[in-house]
Amino acid sequence: MELVRTADELAVRTAAARGRGEVVGLVPTMGALHDGHASLIATACAQCGFVVVSIFVNPLQFGPNEDFAHYPRRLEADLERAGEAGADLVFAPGVEELYPEPVHVTVHVGEPADILEGALRPGHFDGVATVLTRLFNLVGPARAYFGEKDYQQLVIVRDLVRELRLPAEIVNCPTLREADGLARSSRNAYLAPTERAVAPVLHRALVAGASAIAQGERDAAAVRRAMRAVAEAEQGVRVDYLEVADPERLRTLARVDGPVRLLGALRIGAVRLIDNLAAAPGVNP
Ligand code: PAF
């Protein structure tokens, strides 16, 4: 597996792969690779002849009080992980390579970038859409792989690709979980042991919501209360949101009349966790 740092080197490698008739796949990441990323890479390798993993901690998607400076950066370990999972190439550009100064062009995302995560992290999805547009342009993937853990991001990436007619298929992959239900995330590394013990409460809260729906609850406010009751029973947990939304546009629902997406974000100490779950009447989680 090869590491390249520049857009020019990347273009040579991807052109050669396409010349050999290989389908180019992209797994965009911010590094700190874990089993969730490894499973995205493995899925990409099963479907594509040449798999690029990008590793770039994108400054544009972090707010001024967020963890950009402290976000885990461990390229050596990531290269090993990506290679083991089967990647052909890691593209790890510097900031100046993706955002040569001066930056005049960014991407602005409308609904649903202004709710849920977007309401609490203004500009976050504009940053995600901007970096992905640049990465898609440089890599030219036929397929790009995203985890369902960042469900709102996935909805927005689908909008981005459809509306800008980026010639890539978006493949979504299920969330990988620890045995106790905690969704795999690079930010789990921030959890102190006592916080780690509490963290599965987010998944438990979502499961409680999905169970209520499965058993016939149709009032979304009651589902929200059921999720909050579970989350707030744990000491030191602050709920940012626990929502019942339509799975396509993520609009908040008053009633549950069919499949929905339950989405949650909470804070444990200084660590912020997000997760989501599909739910539907009559379907046990
Ligand atoms: O999900 C992530 O890790 C990031 O938001 C992404 C898609 C790599 C863009 O920086």
Image (spheres, rainbow, N blue to C red):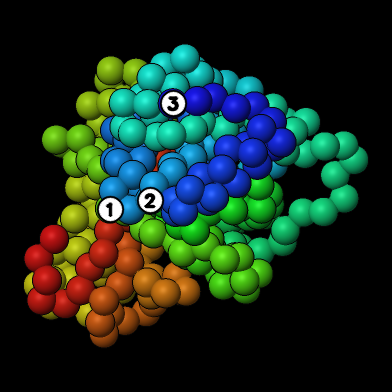
Distance of label 1 from label 2 (alpha carbons): 18 Å
Element assignment for label 3: loop
Element assignment for label 1: loop
Residue 115 x, y percent position in the rendering: 55, 63
The picture quadrant where one finds residue 60 is top right
Residue depicted at x 66% and y 53%: 137
User: What is the residue that sits farthest to the bottom in this orientation?
Assistant: 257
Element assignment for label 2: loop
Residue depicted at x 32% and y 62%: 262
Amino acid at the residue labelled 1: Pro
> Does residue 69 sit above or below 148 in this rendering?
above
Q: Which residue is mark 2?
A: 48
Residue depicted at x 23% and y 40%: 177
Q: Which residue is mark 3?
A: 1
| Mark closer to the observer (3, 1) | 3
- Where residue 174 is drawn, which disc sits there? 1
Residue 212 in the figure: left or right of residue 141: left
Residue 219 in the figure: left or right of residue 268: left
Residue 117 in the figure: left or right of residue 268: right
